[in-house]
Image: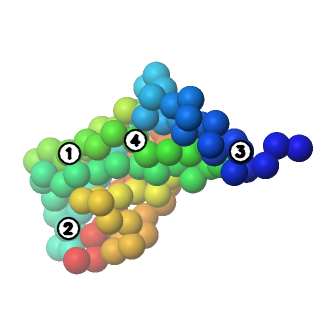
């Protein structure tokens, strides 16, 4: 039986994962500020929570608060806004559309 730690080492060593894979999916993330209005210029990324998961490249929100993130995987994700997940704890399914309401 292959241990999870060995799989992780192979993934890191071989460069397999979200960052190096072909990006054939996209997810729309809408970021709203504490007043519920679109938040422009926010850095957004996704972390896939599966065993082989990984992070996407960053994307930035436009004037409508929308960031389009290209990715290779499908599944459950944690959304990071400006490098932070703990402030809003938003999760979702990718590909798809995810709305983040910021608590700050």
10 Å crowding of disc 2: few (<14), some (14-19), many (20+): some
Quadrant of the image containing the N terminus: top right
Residue assigned mark 4 = 56
- Cα distance in 3D space between marks 3 and 1: 34 Å
Residue assigned mark 3 = 6
Residue mark closest to the camera, 3 vs 1: 3
Residue 7 in the image, given as x and y percentages of width and height: 69, 42
- Cα distance in 3D space between marks 2 and 3: 41 Å
Residue mark closest to the camera, 2 vs 1: 1
Q: Is residue 84 above or below residue 8?
A: below
Task: Tell which circle, 3 or 1, labels the residue nearer the N-terminal end.
Answer: 3
Residue assigned mark 2 = 33
Residue 74 appears in the figure: no
Residue assigned mark 1 = 60
- Cα distance in 3D space between marks 4 and 3: 22 Å
Q: Residue at horizontal 64%, vertical 36%?
A: 10
Cβ–Cβ under 8 Å for marks 4 and 2:
no
Residue 102 in the image, given as x and y percentages of width and height: 27, 70
């Amino acid at each position: 039986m292959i241990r999870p730690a060995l799989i992780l080492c192979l993934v890191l060593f071989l460069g397999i994962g979200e960052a190096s894979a072909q990006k054939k999916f996209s997810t729309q993330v809408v970021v709203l500020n504490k007043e519920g209005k679109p938040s422009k210029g926010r850095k957004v990324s996704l972390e896939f929570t599966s065993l082989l998961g990984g992070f996407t490249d960053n994307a930035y929100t436009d004037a409508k608060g929308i960031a389009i993130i290209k990715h290779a995987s499908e599944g459950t994700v944690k959304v990071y806004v400006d490098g932070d997940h703990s402030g809003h704890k938003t999760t979702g399914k990718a590909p798809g559309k995810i709305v983040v309401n910021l608590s700050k």
